[in-house]
């Protein structure tokens, strides 16, 4: 439901002090409302107050640098309490009692929102009012035209109610960004881990098959699983009577190998047999280690180190990275969004600061990604794991303090590793492999010597048990590897499903958003073009909004430009034409919002317009846009300091049209600001009051304004013809020229015999009033010679002005009450009275 602003009360906010006596402005939803004030009279403070109440901020303060302390300037500097209050009165479109919402700001910047009339959700109501098209000033129109196509497209989305879709599209694009996905979900690392785990499973399977062959003398069926291999190994061991009762029937992993060895020792106790078993156990373990370590390939690690070094070389080091990270955070804060300065040096660089910071941030982000990739490659490398296994094998005789894998772990973590470290580790691993091979040869020779001294049957059992022990460990290793592979594949699969989903969602959403926003552009064209053409007054310049077929960009083109086609708005149109286009688009968006916009507040939006275009815009607002003439149109409130518009406001608000005009007076920011409505009686009172008080100079100034107002009103009401220069030039609307035009027209119709004025009115006008004004006052006033006029004389002039007006009015009783009414023209009445 729409809500309209019926009044606003302001105290202690920005330029409005009014301590103890708030400034109160009343508005009428069914009329166009205008407020005139010279610059520095508090007009923009009214705009800021409404903006703060609705949105919680003031753009001109929010855009200040931190060093300028914008938060210190919301409250009036001269208000004793340093507290600002803004009271909005809103009326629902359906009618009913007005809703009051009180917005307060204290000296510490705290904001409190309440409803004196008891509205249950005042903050939500304010949020519903906070549409992009509600608060408009010159900056909005200039930025809309001058912005980049991308920023303009996003602003347009906000205008036509598609901002949530635009935000969603940007969010999806961020989520689907390849770099973001790789960084946040570590997809390259997970893919590498899955590859490594598959390699481990394959390696463990090969080792299991090799151990099975060593135990049984038969190759394992390639289709056989772990359970079958375990079961066949148990069957093979149960062939030996000495241990058959101890071996489990199915699962080799459940075998108690210590019990098997004890049974063998009990069968034939001898030191040689125990020594043979011990050597066999060590030999099997070292053979397993040797079999698991192939020739180390360090190319992947060295490539990762080189990639990290190359990315680091593009930057200026860690300290500069921290600096640019701080700059990125600063530039994303609201107070820096509109700034082009560097937050570090407060200067404007040649290239856009955000592009520079983003580019450098990307470089440091690449360094982090390469560092993470290096750590991942190192942790997953066979070189690291195999070398560590060799160090812990016992055959290498390397003391823990002299081992190299853990120090390299720390070097990789602190990013001080070099390719030479990897090359050294490769040679170190080869040396350890050689030591293991030497120890294996020694153990085989010792076992061969003992084997010659032991009974053959016992040797076979011992060999089978140790081979089965190794096979059992390989089964466990393969099970663990398969579990880890399954986990890594599940993690990778779930994240890849998200990657596919978000990438497809981004594409689908982008296409739908483009189609919808393009349709909105086409729908809006039928509204903004007629408004634009009516404001500029001709059809030689025909603008066109062009939506990008794939992105969010929105281009301003000229479909027609004095016979030329497909040109760019910013390159050709003057400021007034560009702003007229932006105004038309904003107003069209308000009208095209299905009647959801209740209020538009315009602050000095005609600064770049000439007088003719100003009047055209006002007529468009009155006759096409505002609720006064359009049932679905918004309530229009205009704030202006333009003197020409002030005369227009005075005229249009006094001729019976739906327009409410008010004027601000006062001495802000210290003194109070007051508001006064406009009417002819106001000027008359402003003239009469100082005259009665003896202030003749002041009263004479207002006296001339009152005379000018009455004469121009007569000319307009009874359609007195005037010269063309009088009609189009404000400097020709002198009192004497007005009197000349009226007198000439009256004389013409009197000679023609069709003058509607009564004989007494004609005699009074031509015989007394006009000659008295011209001869005794106007000519003297226009030459500045007022010293000879007394107070009674000036009060008499005031009465003469009223009598001149009465000469062009008749007594009408059509409405049941007799009242003075202007003649329709000099030859006819408005009615049959």
Image (tube, grey):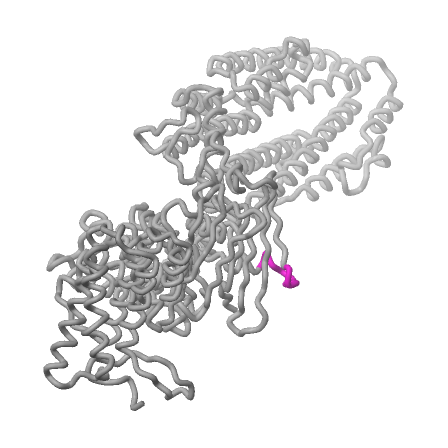
Return the x and y of residue 165 as percentages of the image width and height: 45, 57
Q: Quadrant of the C terminus?
A: bottom left
Q: 366 or 666, which is in the foreground? A: 666
Q: Is residue 47 above or below residue 798?
A: above
* Membership of 120 in magenta stretch: yes
Return the x and y of residue 195 as percentages of the image width and height: 53, 36
Q: Quadrant of residue 770?
A: bottom left
Return the x and y of residue 414 as percentages of the image width and height: 56, 19
Residue 565 showing in the rendered view: yes
Q: Is residue 105 above or below residue 400?
A: below
Q: Which residues are magenta?
A: 116-124
Q: Residue at x 42, y 60 (%)?
A: 600
Q: 213 or 475, which is in the foreground? A: 475
Q: How many numbered markers are drawn? A: 0
Q: Is residue 358 above or below residue 566?
A: above
Image side of residue 463 versus residue 650, left or right: right
Q: Residue at x 48, y 51 (%)?
A: 51
Q: Is residue 297 above or below residue 602?
A: above
* Membership of 359 in magenta stretch: no
Residue 528 showing in the rendered view: no
Return the x and y of residue 319 as percentages of the image width and height: 48, 20
Image side of residue 155 versus residue 435, left or right: left
Outermost residue on the bottom side: it is 832
The secondary structure that most of the magenta stretch takes on is loop
Image side of residue 807 versus residue 41, left or right: left
Image side of residue 579 versus residue 311, left or right: left
Q: Quadrant of residue 385?
A: top right
Q: Residue at x 41, y 72 (%)?
A: 632
């Amino acid at each position: 439901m729409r809500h309209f602003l019926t009044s606003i009360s302001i105290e202690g906010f920005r330029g409005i002090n009014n301590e103890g006596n708030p400034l109160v402005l009343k508005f009428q939803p069914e009329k166009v409302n205008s407020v005139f004030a010279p610059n520095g009279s508090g007009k923009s403070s009214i705009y800021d107050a409404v903006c703060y109440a609705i949105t919680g901020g003031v753009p001109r303060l929010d855009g200040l640098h931190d060093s300028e302390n914008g938060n210190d300037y919301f409250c009036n500097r001269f208000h004793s309490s340093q507290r600002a209050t803004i009271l909005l009165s809103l009326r629902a479109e359906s009618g009913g009692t007005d809703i009051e919402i009180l917005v307060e700001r204290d000296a510490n910047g705290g904001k409190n929102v309440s409803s004196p009339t008891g509205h249950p959700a005042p903050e939500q109501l304010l949020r519903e009012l906070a549409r992009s098209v509600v608060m408009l000033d010159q900056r909005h129109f200039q930025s809309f035209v001058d912005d980049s196509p991308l920023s303009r497209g996003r602003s347009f989305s906000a205008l036509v109610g598609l901002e949530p879709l635009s935000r969603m599209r940007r969010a999806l694009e961020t989520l689907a960004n390849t770099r973001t996905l790789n960084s946040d979900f570590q997809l390259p690392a997970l893919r590498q881990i899955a590859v490594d785990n598959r390699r481990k499973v394959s390696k463990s399977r090969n080792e299991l098959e090799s151990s099975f062959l060593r135990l049984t003398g038969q190759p394992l069926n390639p289709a056989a699983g772990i359970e079958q291999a375990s079961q066949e190994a148990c069957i093979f061991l149960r062939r030996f009577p000495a241990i058959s009762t101890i071996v489990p029937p199915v699962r080799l992993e459940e075998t108690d190998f210590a019990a098997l060895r004890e049974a063998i020792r009990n069968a034939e106790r001898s030191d040689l047999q125990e020594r043979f078993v011990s050597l066999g156990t060590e030999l099997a373990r070292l053979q397993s280690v040797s079999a698991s370590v192939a020739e180390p390939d360090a190319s992947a690690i060295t490539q990762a180190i080189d990639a990290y070094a190359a990315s680091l070389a593009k930057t200026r080091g860690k300290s500069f990275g921290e600096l640019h990270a701080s700059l990125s955070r600063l530039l994303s804060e609201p107070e820096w969004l509109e700034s082009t300065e560097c937050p570090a040096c407060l200067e404007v660089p040649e290239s856009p600061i955000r592009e520079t910071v983003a580019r450098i941030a990307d470089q440091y982000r690449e360094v982090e990604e390469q560092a993470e990739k290096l750590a991942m490659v190192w942790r997953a490398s066979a070189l690291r794991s195999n070398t560590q296994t060799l160090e812990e094998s016992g055959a290498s005789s390397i003391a823990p303090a002299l081992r190299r894998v853990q120090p390299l772990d720390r070097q990789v973590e602190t990013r001080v590793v070099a390719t030479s470290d990897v090359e050294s580790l490769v040679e170190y691993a080869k040396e350890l492999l050689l030591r293991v091979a030497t120890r294996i040869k020694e153990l085989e020779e010792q076992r061969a010597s003992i084997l010659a001294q032991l009974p053959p049957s016992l040797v076979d059992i011992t060999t089978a048990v140790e081979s089965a022990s190794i096979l059992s460990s390989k089964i466990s290793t393969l099970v663990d590897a398969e579990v880890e592979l399954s986990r890594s594949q599940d993690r990778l699969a779930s994240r890849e499903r998200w990657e596919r989903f978000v990438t497809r969602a981004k594409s689908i959403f982008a296409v739908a958003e483009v189609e919808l926003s393009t349709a909105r552009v086409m729908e809006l064209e039928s509204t903004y073009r007629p408004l634009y053409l009516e404001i500029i007054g001709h059809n030689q310049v025909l603008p066109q909004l062009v939506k990008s077929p794939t992105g969010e960009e929105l281009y301003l083109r000229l479909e027609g430009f004095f016979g030329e086609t497909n040109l760019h708005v910013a390159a050709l149109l003057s400021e007034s034409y560009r702003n007229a286009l932006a105004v038309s688009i904003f107003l069209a968006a308000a009208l095209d919002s299905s009647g959801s916009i209740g209020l538009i507040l315009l602050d000095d939006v005609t600064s770049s317009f000439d007088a003719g275009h100003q009047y055209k815009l006002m007529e468009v607002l009155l006759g096409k846009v505002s609720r006064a003439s359009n049932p679905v149109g918004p309530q229009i409130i205009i704030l202006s300091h333009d003197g020409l518009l002030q005369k227009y406001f005075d005229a249009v608000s006094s001729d019976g049209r739906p327009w409410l005009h008010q004027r601000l007076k006062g001495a802000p920011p210290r003194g109070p600001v007051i508001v006064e409505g406009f009417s002819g009686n106001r000027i008359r009172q402003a003239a009469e009051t100082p005259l009665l008080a003896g202030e003749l100079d002041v009263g004479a100034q207002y006296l001339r304004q009152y005379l000018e107002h009455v004469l121009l009103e007569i000319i307009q009401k009874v359609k007195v013809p005037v010269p063309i220069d009088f009609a189009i030039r404000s400097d020709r609307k002198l009192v004497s020229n007005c009197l000349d035009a009226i007198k000439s027209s009256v004389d013409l119709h009197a000679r023609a015999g069709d003058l509607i004025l009564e004989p007494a009115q004609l005699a009074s006008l031509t015989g007394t009033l006009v000659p008295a004004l011209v001869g005794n006052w106007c000519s003297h006033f226009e030459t500045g010679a007022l010293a000879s006029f007394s107070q009674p004389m000036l009060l008499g002039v005031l009465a003469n002005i009223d009598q001149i007006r009465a000469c062009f009015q008749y007594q009408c009783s059509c409405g049941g009450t007799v009242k003075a009414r202007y003649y329709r023209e000099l030859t006819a009445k408005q009615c049959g009275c």
